[in-house]
């Protein structure tokens, strides 16, 4: 099987490359090989490669940056997924596309399910919702996987930022009124593999699904958990101070409730997620192993 992975250096893509090695031939294309801002190039590339599966792990992920460059955000997050969906439909192959909790406004008091009406607050969320709509409109074989608060041992993310700042500073202020589920890319990639295996068995149920870790926590609580691991390792750790979102000004407004109900994924596909605390510990173990092998994170 030939699998086209759009995105090369991002958190999710790098984990997919590790965990899907035995699925088949992985054709990984980053910005240098495939500029997703050029729809005609996307079409030409997919037709030339003729893959059996497309996984779109690329996109414009700068939530605050998107506010000042909406055209770029919509090109990558909305137009490109729609083109990929059209080409996948023409080849009669599946498309797996990742989306976000930011398609919701966070005003609901309970976790969001897939049937709740989206209402994104910022450009990033609006562009991701437009991408979902473009993929769904094609009505082909597709999975839209909404996840939240993604972190990994690679690149730039909350985990790596906190590990650095907690050791550099004596005091750190972290938002405590945004609630969600930090989700490790290892869990996302493992679930993606399980979805591929389910499709190959002939049990696929296409559509939109929520895919996040179990449990809930604030950014402050997540930072506390990261700090606890540093202290257990005998490393320095800053004093954490909880603050409100209004005390941490940012270009984009974030939803206060980012909790997603993942029961549909478990019901339809038999795929469940670990608790965020367990996944964090697994990620840290994985991080230690990668460091021991001299990996560049």
Image (spheres, rainbow, N blue to C red):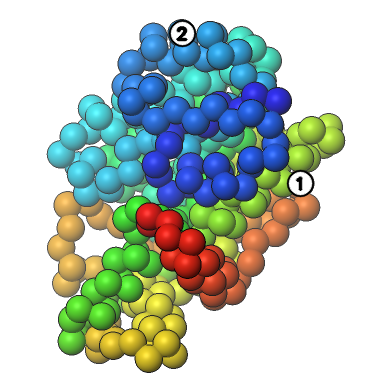
Residue 250 screen position, x and y as percent = 18, 58
Residue 280 screen position, x and y as percent = 51, 71
Name the foreground residue: 216 vs 231: 231
Q: How many marks?
A: 2
Q: Compute the Cα span from label 1 to label 2.
A: 34 Å
Q: Is residue 14 above or below residue 183?
A: above
Please give left or right for residue 204 compared with residue 95 in the image.
right
Residue 114 shows up from this direction: no
Residue 200 shows up from this direction: yes
Q: Is residue 199 above or below residue 171?
A: above
- Residue shown at the point (25%, 89%) measured from the top left: 239
**Circle 2 crowding by C-alpha within 10 Å: few under 14, some 14–19, many from 20:** few
- Residue shown at the point (20%, 44%) measured from the top left: 65
Depth check, mark 1 against mark 2: the one in front is 2
- Residue shown at the point (24%, 74%) measured from the top left: 165
- Residue shown at the point (25%, 55%) measured from the top left: 253
Q: Mark 1 or mark 2, which has the lower sequence index?
A: 2
Please give left or right for residue 180 compared with residue 254 in the image.
right
The disc label shown at residue 30, or none: none
Quarter occupied by residue 30: top left
Quarter occupied by residue 49: top right
The quarter of the image holding the N terminus is top right
Residue furthest out toward the front: 293
Q: Is residue 280 above or below residue 258?
A: below
Quarter occupied by residue 70: top left
Name the foreground residue: 282 vs 246: 282
Q: Disc 2 marks which residue?
A: 44
Q: Disc 1 marks which residue?
A: 268
Residue 149 screen position, x and y as percent = 42, 59
Q: Secondary structure at mark 1?
A: helix
Q: Is residue 37 above or below residue 58?
A: above
């Amino acid at each position: 099987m030939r699998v086209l992975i759009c995105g090369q250096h991002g958190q999710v893509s790098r984990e997919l490359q590790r965990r899907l090695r035995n699925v088949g031939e992985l054709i990984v294309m980053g910005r240098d090989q495939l500029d997703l801002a050029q729809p005609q190039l996307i079409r030409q590339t997919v037709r030339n490669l003729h893959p059996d599966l497309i996984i779109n792990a690329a996109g414009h992920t700068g939530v605050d940056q998107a506010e000042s460059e909406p055209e770029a955000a919509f090109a990558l997050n909305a137009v490109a997924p729609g083109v990929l969906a059209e080409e996948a439909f023409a080849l009669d192959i599946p498309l797996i596309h990742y989306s976000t909790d930011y398609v919701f406004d966070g005003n609901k008091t309970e976790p969001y399910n897939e049937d709740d009406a989206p209402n994104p607050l910022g450009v990033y969320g609006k562009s991701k919702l437009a991408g979902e709509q473009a993929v769904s409109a094609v009505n082909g074989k597709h999975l839209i996987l909404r996840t939240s608060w993604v972190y990994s041992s690679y690149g730039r993310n909350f985990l790596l930022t906190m590990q650095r700042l907690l050791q550099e500073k004596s005091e750190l202020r972290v938002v405590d009124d945004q609630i969600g589920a930090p989700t490790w890319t290892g869990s996302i990639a493992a679930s993606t593999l399980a979805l591929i295996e389910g499709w190959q068995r002939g049990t696929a149920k296409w559509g939109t699904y929520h895919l996040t870790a179990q449990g809930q926590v604030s950014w402050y609580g997540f930072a506390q958990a990261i700090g606890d691991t540093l202290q257990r390792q005998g490393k320095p750790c800053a004093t954490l101070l909880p603050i409100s979102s209004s005390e941490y000004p940012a270009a984009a407004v974030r939803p206060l409730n980012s909790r997603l109900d993942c029961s549909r994924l478990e019901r339809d596909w038999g795929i469940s997620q670990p608790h965020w605390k367990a996944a964090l510990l697994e990620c840290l173990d994985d991080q230690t192993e990668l460091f021991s092998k001299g990996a560049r994170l």
